[in-house]
Image: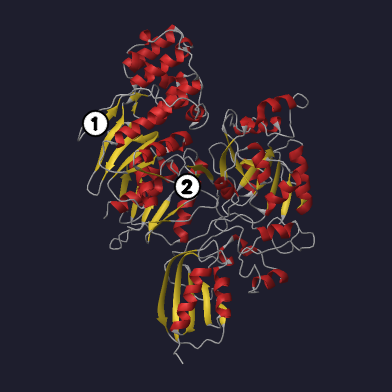
Amino acid sequence: MMAKNCYQIIIKGIVQGIGFRPFIYTLAIELDLKGWVKNSGEGVVIEVELTTVELDIFITRIKAEKPLQSEIYSLEIKLSNWVGYQQFTIKNLDTIDNRRKTAIVLPDLSTCQECLEEIFNSQNRRYCYPFTNCTNCGPRYSIIKDLPYDRPFTTMSKFRMCKECEEEYYNPKNRRFHAQPNACQKCGPKLELWNKKGNILASFDEAIKKSCNLIIEGKILAVKGLGGFHLIADARHNEAIKILRQRKNRPHKPLAVMYPNLEKIKADCLVSDIEKNILLSVASPIVLLRKVSNLNNLNQKESFKNNPKIDNNYISEEVAPHNNYLGVMLPYTPLHHLLLKKLNFPIIATSGNQKNEPICIDEIEALDRLNCLADYFLIHNRPIFRAVDDSIVRVIDNQMMILRRGRGYAPLPIKLLDFPEEKPHKILALGGNLKNTIAIGFNQQIFTSQHIGDLDKPETIKAYKNTINNLSKIYEFQPDLIVCDAHPDYFSSQYAEELSKQKKPSIPVIQIQHHLAHIFATIAEHNLELPLLGIAWDGTGYGFDDTIWGGEFFYISDTEIKRIGSFLPFPLMGGSQAILQPKRIALALLNLVYNNFQNIPKNLSIIDSYSSSELKLFQTILDKKINTPLTSSVGRLFDGVASLLNIIDNITFEGQAAMNLEFLVSDFCPHKTYTFQWQHQENICNYIDWRSIIREIINDYLEKKSLSLIATKFHLTLVEIIKQISQTINTKNIVLSGGCFQNKFLLENTIQVLKQNHFNPYWSQKIPINDGGLSIGQIAFIIRNMR
């Protein structure tokens, strides 16, 4: 008979909050093993007494049969002292765990099919209970206060389980065996409908019924969900959406729509198999889908003659005006499912916040901050520990690309295979100022926060600081290095210096150039080998020469980083005013092309829109370089071209002009390009001269060629620029990064052309390609340069 030993097995990875301990327990009982399993700060720890043969079988089956949502990053086995266990148990937190906290915090998970069947089964005790969950679904990241993931360390600690829930919790054959947020009508969170004064109008089922009636009437509801509040309204109701836009000061930016089911989405949007799988996934993000024939606008307009406020067959054009895409999602909590089941039509589900503020997570806070936005409040008393916005994704080249990393994905880490063990730096990255995220790097991983937002309001800055503190607390993280953007005026950069000085001695701070952080985020995600060509196109990034960059080409090897190309700089007339008024950019482009406004061809609408005195003033501003900072930004070039074509006046949200230009492109237009000048020379930054592009666009416009043709040629010209520059570099790996590559037509055509010319294009997919990925790129840049 083989001798038995006591072994301790430490499993790290995505192993908390998904029934991993119950799985280990059930497997151990089946194999007649003795010992215990528990959560720890590192992951899951098992102590078990068995033979080496039994150990091999146990480990093999753990790897083969682990829960669907789990992922094992490492599995360490070591001998332990013999105890002589008599049974196998799930161990409670009765001792202090001194291990360093490295466990993976699981994102919030959408409602599973078994829980859905229960809430719609009138014979089940959880019938219509809006907070039903199990080990396979429900809140995780939004309710976790600390590691390990056990009920006492979550916001569910205030709810004591009733007898029935406790029996489920301790029954190894039950789906809710050690499900930490387990609850029911008797013992769990309660649902209430409030008016604007906070008076209770209804509770539980009646609250849902009345809420649905109010939505049908055209009212706007603030609904407390999983990671914060939504503002909800009937997506078919023109007047309700117009009122919501007015109240939220959001005249044009698209609104997200939640549909009752996939079939109703397919009535409005084209849905590929990949997009369908993403919609139905446990992450359940917002997915950008192509509208079907502009939502059959002709039929829609005809039907509105009978009732201009609402049409039962189509969502309102006010949802995403002049936009070819719709941001859609499916219900992902029992509360959403109960509402949508009764309504059976799509609803607006936009973030519950004032413009540019973080989403509300507390009902008392919402009553204050959202009172001017919502007519009623559907709330519950399960505390949300941290705000987690809905994630936004789109499909590029048949692969998912995350544009906003929030619910369902944050805070899952990015693994760095080249994190140098001899330099165990604990790095805090503070990101940029727009679409901010923060990240912490240690133990060969980068843990990134959820989307925080733009750091331009006190409320968002408060949320930013809280996120840094929360993520640091969970992992008992004390940085020995802080990294930030190089822009001296960014709040994130200034806060880096403030954090540094809070410690004695002060923590070193390293500033990372904006576009290099973009590129290194993609390098980290794909673990790319050098050398490569890194391309970063966006709206704004502080350059080494103190100008605004945004159309950059870098050659990156193990020994050097060279800026080999950029777009010919042009002035932003009025500085930041030009970003909101792209006519100023268009005028600056014209001035550089024609040397003077007087030389510009006649009958150009942008020139005709100004008086001669106004043009004279603008000419003076440009000639004397009065508040005209230079930029090489492709994002601003998009703005200028959109204005020249008279398709945008003033900007009301970031990327609006570029989106309008993208929506004009057509796959059916001839694949022609405009001419540009670029000559490759070694050891200098070679500038792409775009002036002939603008001149030819003006010629096409004055010849009344279709805007679709002009927009398509402009996009394909940018693709051609990338191809030609790539052909001058002795590497096949090309990184495409920066917010301009959120443009589906631009990115997919660039990928296609590069592949056709035998290059290997890479772009961010798990990390936002926009500024939401900067924090990861900042850490990745440091790690790569430690090697």
Identify the coloring: secondary structure
**Left or right side of 411 for 779:** left
Mark 1–mark 2 CB contact (< 8 Å): no
The picture places residue 486, in percent across and down from the top left corner, at 33, 41
Q: Which residue is pictured at 36% across the width and 30% down the height?
A: 720
**Left or right side of 557 for 292:** right
Q: Please, is residue 425 above or below residue 268 in the view?
A: below
Q: Nearer the viewer, mark 1 or mark 2?
A: 1
Q: Please, is residue 53 above or below residue 658 in the view?
A: below
Three-letter residue code for mark 1? His
Residue denoted by label 2:
464
Q: Which residue is pictured at 22% across the width and 48% down the height?
A: 559
Tell me the element at label 1.
loop
The answer to which image quadrant residue 536 occupies is top left
Three-letter residue code for mark 2? Tyr
Is residue 98 or residue 349 the one in the foreground?
Answer: 349
How many angstroms separate mark 1 from mark 2 (CA)?
A: 43 Å
Residue denoted by label 1:
680
In the image as oriented, which residue stretches furthest toward the bottom?
1
The picture places residue 672, in percent across and down from the top left corner, at 41, 24
